[in-house]
Image (spheres, grey):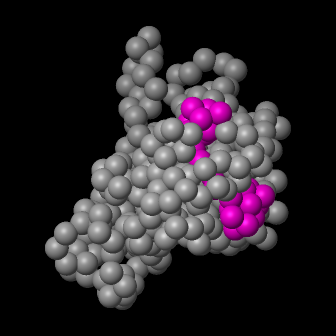
Amino acid sequence: MAGGLSQGLRVIPGPPPSEGGPVSTTTHAAAAFQQIIMPDLVVVAPKGISPAALAQVRKIHGLRAVLAVDGASLTVGGQRVNAIGVDGQQYRSWTPLRTASREGLWSSLDRGGFAVSPTVRRTLGLHRGSHYTLTGSSPVSLPFSGAAPLGITGIDLVVSNRYSSRLGLIHNVAALVSAPGLAMGTLQREVRAALGPGGSLTPLRQQQQPLPVDTGHSGARPSNYLDLFRESAAQYCPTMSWTILAAIGQIESGDGTNMGPSTAGALGPMQFLPSTWKIWGIAAFGEPEPPNIMDPYDAVPSAARYLCAAGAGTPSGLAGAIYAYNHATWYVNEVLALAHQYAQAYG
C-alpha cells in the first residue's frame, strides 16, 4: 500500500497565499497558530522511520523542526488516494499559510474528520459534513472536513493519526525536515547519517520558478522568480536584501502558484489587497499601464517599493516593514528565517 505514497510524495516549494498581503487583515490567524515552518527536505521510508532514527535526526545541529507522518494508499468512492495520518495541530504549521489559517478545518480534523486536496474534492464530488468510507486495511466512515491545498504534491487526503492503525497507514512512513541555517548538502549528509541506508531524500530548495513567458516583449527581463526578486530589490530598494522579497513571495503565493483571491480579497503573486495596490502598485520592467496586480513584473517591484517606504532599506527598520506587510510577529520571524535560508542556498 505504501508504493504509491512513497513514489508520489514531495513537498510543494513553498506555501500558497496568506489571507491579506500588505497591511494584512490576518492577525487573527496568529491566535490559532504561531508559525509557518518551511520544509527543506522530505524523507520517505516505505517501511517506516524508526524512533531511534528520528531521534538521531532531531539531534542534528542547526535543525529547526522535524515532523513524521503516517501514510499509505486508501480507497475513497472507488478511487485510490494517497493519505497521511497526522497530529493536525502540528501538521498545520507545515501547510500553506491560507490552509493553516482555516481554524474550522483543523478543528473538524481534530474531531475525527478528513481533508482532501481541491482536485480530489472535485473528482469525488465530496460535500462538507457528509460521511464517507475510507478503506485501507479496514473501512472507516468519517465526515468530510473540507478541501484545501495540503502542501505536499502527491498527497490527496489528510486524516487524524488516531485512525492510522485502523486504516493500515504505515507508521512514520515519511518526515518533513526544516533546517534554514544549514546548507543543503550538509543537511542531506547529516540526515542520511542519522537514518542509515534505505529510504529517499528529496531536497525542497528548488525555488527558481519560471515566470510567464511573453514572446511579444522586447528587451531582456528576468526569466524566473529568483532573478525577478534580485532585480526588483536592486531597482526599487537597493539597500534591502533581495532575499526578503523572495521569502515573502514564497510564503504569500508559492512564487505565483496560487494567485488568490484570499478570503480577505488579496490577489497576485505578492498577495496585495486591492486597496493597497491602488496606492503602491506600479508598472515595471516595460509592462504597460495600468499596473496589473496579477502580473509578477509589476507585483514584485511594487512590493519592493512598499517595503522600502516602510523602512526595509535599513537594518533597524526591516522587521517593522515586514510587520507592516502582514501584522503578525511570527510572520516577521518566518520571513527572516526563510530569507536566511535563501541566502544560504543561493548566496
Q: Position of residue 35 (x, y in %)?
A: 63, 70
In-front residue for pair 209/155: 155
Q: Position of residue 9 (x, y in %)?
A: 38, 53
Q: Residue at x 59, y 28 (%)?
A: 295
Q: Indicate the quadrant where residue 91 lies.
A: bottom right
Q: Say if 161 sits above or below 143 in the image.
A: below
In-front residue for pair 320/192: 192
Q: Residue at x 56, y 21 (%)?
A: 287
Q: Residue furthest left?
A: 197
Picture mark count: 0
Q: Say if 100 sits above or below 225 in the image.
A: below
Q: Say if 262 sits above or below 326 in the image.
A: above
Quadrant that contains the C terminus = bottom left
Relative placement, left or right, of 81 versus 123 is: left
Q: Residue furthest top?
A: 216
Segment tinted magenta in the rendering: 102-125
Relative placement, left or right, of 301 versus 34 is: left
Residue 112 highlighted magenta (yes or no):
yes
Q: Position of residue 95 (x, y in %)?
A: 57, 58
Relative placement, left or right, of 152 versus 261 is: left
Quadrant that contains the N terminus = bottom left
In-front residue for pair 41/48: 48
Residue 294 highlighted magenta (yes or no):
no
Q: Position of residue 92 (x, y in %)?
A: 61, 64
Q: Indicate the quadrant where residue 56 lies.
A: bottom left
Q: Residue at x 73, y 40 (%)?
A: 127
